[in-house]
Image (cartoon, helix red, strand yellow):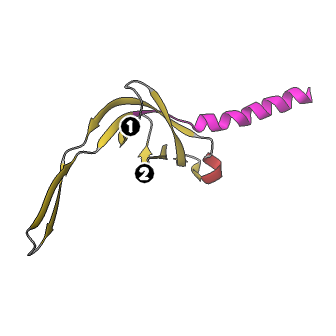
């Protein structure tokens, strides 16, 4: 089972137990965070759109950091124009603890239980 979730206008593929680097989050190490799911795939098939509107990926923040430095070098030939600049992208490392497929199924069970109570 895997899910594709969205964060910072980027999409990530995740399974339970995966450790993923995402855009930097304002959350402390050890905090729980949730992300909206775009697509979910499991034994029953693939679900997307309105079928997964209320389903979320739960994760725990493992650490914060910066990526390896990249060099941005701008150069214009014959103009003696050069500009060298470095960049380190900040990230948050998360560990996926649960994919909320069970959360999507719970309301259906609640509706069935309510229907049984009403029938009695």
Q: Residue at x 44, y 40 (%)?
A: 15
Instruction: Return the residue found at the far bottom.
Output: 78
What residue do we see at 43% from left, 43% from top? 14
Task: Residue under label 2, please give it.
Answer: 10
The answer to whether one can see residue 104 in this image is yes
Which image quarter: residue 28? Answer: top left
Q: Position of residue 115 (x, y in %)?
A: 85, 32
Label 1 residue SS: loop
> Could you tell me residue 63's position as x and y percent?
32, 30
Whole-percent x and y of residue 2? 47, 44
| Quadrant in the picture for the C terminus | top right
Segment colored magenta: 95-120
- Above or below for 21 versus 59: below
Q: Which mark is residue 99?
A: none
Q: Depth check: give the residue in front, 29 or 71.
A: 71
Q: What residue does disc 1 label?
A: 18
């Amino acid at each position: 089972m895997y899910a594709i979730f969205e964060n910072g206008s980027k999409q990530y593929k995740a399974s339970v137990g995966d450790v993923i680097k995402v855009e930097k989050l304002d959350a402390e190490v050890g905090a729980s965070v949730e992300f909206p799911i775009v697509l979910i795939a499991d034994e029953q098939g693939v679900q997307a759109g309105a079928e997964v509107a209320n389903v979320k990926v739960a994760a725990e923040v493992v650490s914060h950091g910066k990526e390896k430095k990249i060099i941005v070098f701008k150069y214009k030939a014959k103009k003696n124009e050069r500009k060298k600049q470095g960049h380190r992208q900040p990230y948050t490392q998360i560990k996926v603890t649960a994919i909320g497929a069970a959360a999507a199924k719970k309301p259906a069970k609640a509706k069935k239980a309510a229907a049984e109570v009403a029938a009695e």
